[in-house]
Image (cartoon, rainbow, N blue to C red):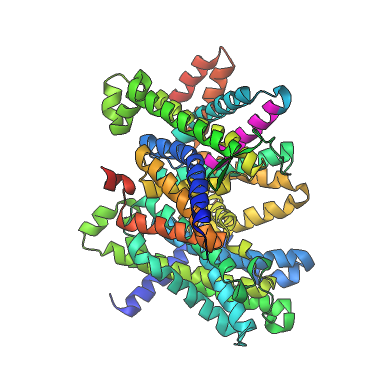
Amino acid sequence: MTLSHSINSIRQKIVEDAKTPKGYVALSVLAIALLAPAIFGGYLFEIVLQMVVFVLVVASWNLIAGYFGVFSFAHAALFGVGGYIAAILAGTYGIHPVATIVIGGGGAAIASLIIAPMILRLGGSYVAMATLAYAEILYLLVYVLDDITGGAMGYIEHPALFDGNMIPLYYFALAIVLLNLAVLYVLLRSRFGLIGRAIREEEDAAKMLGNNTDRYKVYAFVLSSAMAGTAGGIHAFNIRIFSPSMMAIEMMIEFMAMAVIGGIGTSLGPVVGVIAVLGFSEFFRSFGEIRLLLWGLLLMFTIMFFPGGLAGSSVQQDLLRDQAGKLRSAFGSQSAQDEHSSKEQ
Amino acid sequence: MVSLDLILQQLANGILFGGQIALIAVGLTLIWGVMDVLNFAHGSMLMIGGYIGLYTIQATESLILAAILATVGVFVLGVITDQVLIQRLKEREDAEITLILGTFGLAITLEHGVSVLLGSSQLAFPSLFEGVWEIGSITLGKTRVYLFVVALITILLLFTLIRFTKIGFAIRAVSQDANTAKLMGVNTDRIYSITFGLGAALAGLSGMLIAPVYNVYPAVGWQPFLLAFIVVIIGGLGSVRGTLLAALATGVFRSLSLTWFSSQATLIFMFGAMIFVLIFLPNGFAEVIE
């Protein structure tokens, strides 16, 4: 396949995708994102900026978990690695922040490359366990190296980007995130994405067709780690104090919940998930602890009844109906009749 | 210099600690071995056991009743969890991922549900037994020793249950080959529920047993869960014997390492060992033993 041919086919796919209902949603979200500084003010604007950054992490996790079926627990930690590298290089060593964000992404890629080739050969759940252990190691290293990282108090010595002016920072972040999303979009619609989905569905079959699946998984893992690290770098300059809680397991759960609620393995999922979860969190902020309870319930509910997430395919109506039938049979006499009729439909 | 006495003391502490972690880890490994489910809500079930134990003791001042209620209460919670959540997710094609996320969701729900209902402050558990024993230069807190003994007896009971009773026989059958067991007339769904309940019940009991050391609060389960998680992997997922050995070894290693290194560095070594085992000895210690 020549280059011009593949560019053409991707252009066609973009046009096709843009004409679907989801394409309209994506375009309107993009329009709102571009106009955000004019629409939102103050605190709300900070939330939007945070959403932009989180979309990149969640999309990076979605690449490896949603398309390649590799369930990584390490992405919050790698997000943190990128953030710490960027903040420390800019703060302690005086390197230009924009350069440190790129280096942070590279650092996260290297941190993932250390274990990727070895652990990606393990099967499903074992990858989750190994990455969880690795994530804990990276998290604990922040405490062990507290001379450099500032330990539990967090790192605060990095300078502000764009003299602390939020609007250029916002467009800078948005540009980087959109660039990364564009790369993801193109990759996932090329052979790379096809092989990823083949690995997710049936790795042995993909291997039998002559694909070096281990190598593709490593590529995808390292690429998605680099993206998570880049997001971490931007986040460090956004929140100005980078603490270990940014890379704790709770953060990972939050990213996963965003991906799952939005729709794992869909290109729009991360965007929808981040907006839904962060928006939901902010809406219920004054409710304190109840917010987190609702959040856990929402995660369970989504997994049980909407496996495709908000942006995914249709609601699994049969599951809901099945559940309603069970409830009814628990409550009384009509049950048998109802269940019978629901099966006939 | 570190004296020999200190090392002996740390060895004793490590063994006692290992016994407690073993009880948590055995529940985790039982669920994995039979059902292929890694229960990330194990720590929050432990937390629930701690609360049940604490409130029972405050109401009745009976230690035995508290232990029984913590075990039975969390057993019921486990059975409900299996019926409502696990069995539904187990049938999915992407069961591995959905089970991890589902049990995680449950963990968050339980933790913050308790937080909302009962508050998030640390509640002190009454010290069960006052005093220490001194053997040579080593001092052993009575509470810790009794808890160790209770943990060992419980694990022994579990062994007996699995080896000699009809239910245990069915559990082993399902664990080896669920389809064949089903053909032989075993109600596999019920065995899964019982197994999940048993594993959870062990967590519930441990939650009460470790409460005098860790106190009781909504997030109390995470640290013991992570330790049990390491132990289960190093011991070999699904192997009760490997888990026991790994628990004692991990307990001793932890105590000794804490003599020289910070708690964070100690955990790094342990997680490092866990990754090493996952890569080079996928079946853990169990492979080496058998």
Query: Looking at the image, which is closer to me, B279 or B183?
Result: B279
- Name which residue lies at 25% across and 53% down: A204
Q: Does residue B121 appear left or right of residue B97 in this picture?
A: right
Is residue B245 or residue B256 the one in the foreground?
B256
Q: Is residue A240 visible?
A: yes
**In which quadrant will I find the C terminus of chain B?**
top left
Q: Is residue B163 left or right of residue A136?
A: left
Residue B59 highlighted magenta (yes or no):
no
Residue B15: % across, % down: 47, 44
Q: Position of residue A75 (x, y in %)?
A: 50, 62
Residue B44 drawn in magenta: yes
Q: What secondary structure is the magenta-colored segment mainly?
A: helix
Q: Nearer the viewer, residue A38 or A72?
A: A72
Q: Is residue A128 above or below residue A75?
A: above
- Residue A148 sits in which quadrant? bottom right
Residue B61 against residue A241 in the figure, above or below: above
A4 vs B54: above or below: below
Residue A172, position in %: x, y?
62, 78
Q: Nearer the viewer, residue A259 or B234?
A: B234
- In the image, what residue occupies the spot 31% across and 51% down? B282
In which quarter of the view is residue B178 placed? top left
Q: Residue furthest front?
A: B136
Q: Position of residue B48 (x, y in %)?
A: 61, 35
Q: Residue at x 68, y 65 (%)?
A: A48
Magenta segment: B42-57
Question: Can residue A314 be seen?
Answer: no
